[in-house]
Image (cartoon, helix red, strand yellow):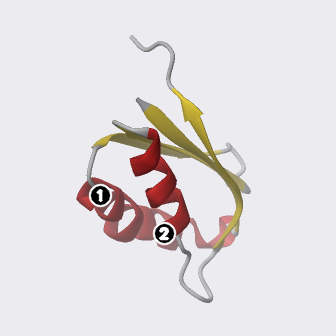
Amino acid sequence: MFAVFGKASLDSSRMDEIVELQNSIAVPMAKAQAGHVTTYISHSADGSHGASIYVFETKEQAEAFAASLKVPAGAPVTIESLEVFEVTAHG
């Protein structure tokens, strides 16, 4: 398995909108991709930073998803980084 690890800056004053975007766009988009295994999206206690993990069966699937991940214009989220890693253990 391979995971896309994402880091983002968030506008904490718009947290309700952020959570709505996660549930209405990010998660469904990931689930629709071939090889999707699971998704986790989280944010810091102060709401200023976000982190995500999207897990796929193959490296190619993870890379394709990372390349397709876009944030709508004006969204309260700025993607800082997306990296693909091999999953070497899980429990």
Work out whether 2 lies above or below 60: above
Label 2 sits on residue? 68
Work out whether 47 lies above or below 21: above
Label 1 sits on residue? 33
What's the distance in space between the residues labelled 2 and 1, CA to CA?
A: 10 Å
Locate residue 44 relative to residue 2 in the image: left or right: right
Locate residue 90 relative to residue 50 in the image: left or right: left
Query: What's the residue at 48%, 69% (across, down)?
Result: 68
Locate residue 2 relative to residue 33 in the image: left or right: right
Q: Are marks 2 and 1 in contact (CB under 8 Å)?
A: yes
Query: What's the residue at 72%, 50% (across, down)?
Result: 46
**Residue in front for this viewpoint, 4 or 59:** 59
| Residue type (three-letter) at the residue carrying disc 1 | Gln
Residue 26 lies, in percent from the top left, at: 41, 63
Q: Classify residue 77 by image quadrant.
A: bottom right
Residue 4 lies, in percent from the top left, at: 54, 44
Residue 73 lies, in percent from the top left, at: 60, 89
- Closer to the N terminus: mark 2 or mark 1? 1
Query: What's the residue at 67%, 71% (across, down)?
Result: 13
Quadrant for the C terminus in the image: top left
Quadrant for the N terminus in the image: top left
| Residue type (three-letter) at the residue carrying disc 2 | Ser
Label 1 sits on a secondary structure element that is: loop
Residue 35 lies, in percent from the top left, at: 28, 45
Indicate which disc residue 14 carries.
Answer: none
Q: Residues within 10 Å of mark 1 (few under 14, many from 20)?
A: some
* Count of marks overlaid on the render: 2
Q: Residues within 10 Å of mark 2 (few under 14, many from 20)?
A: few
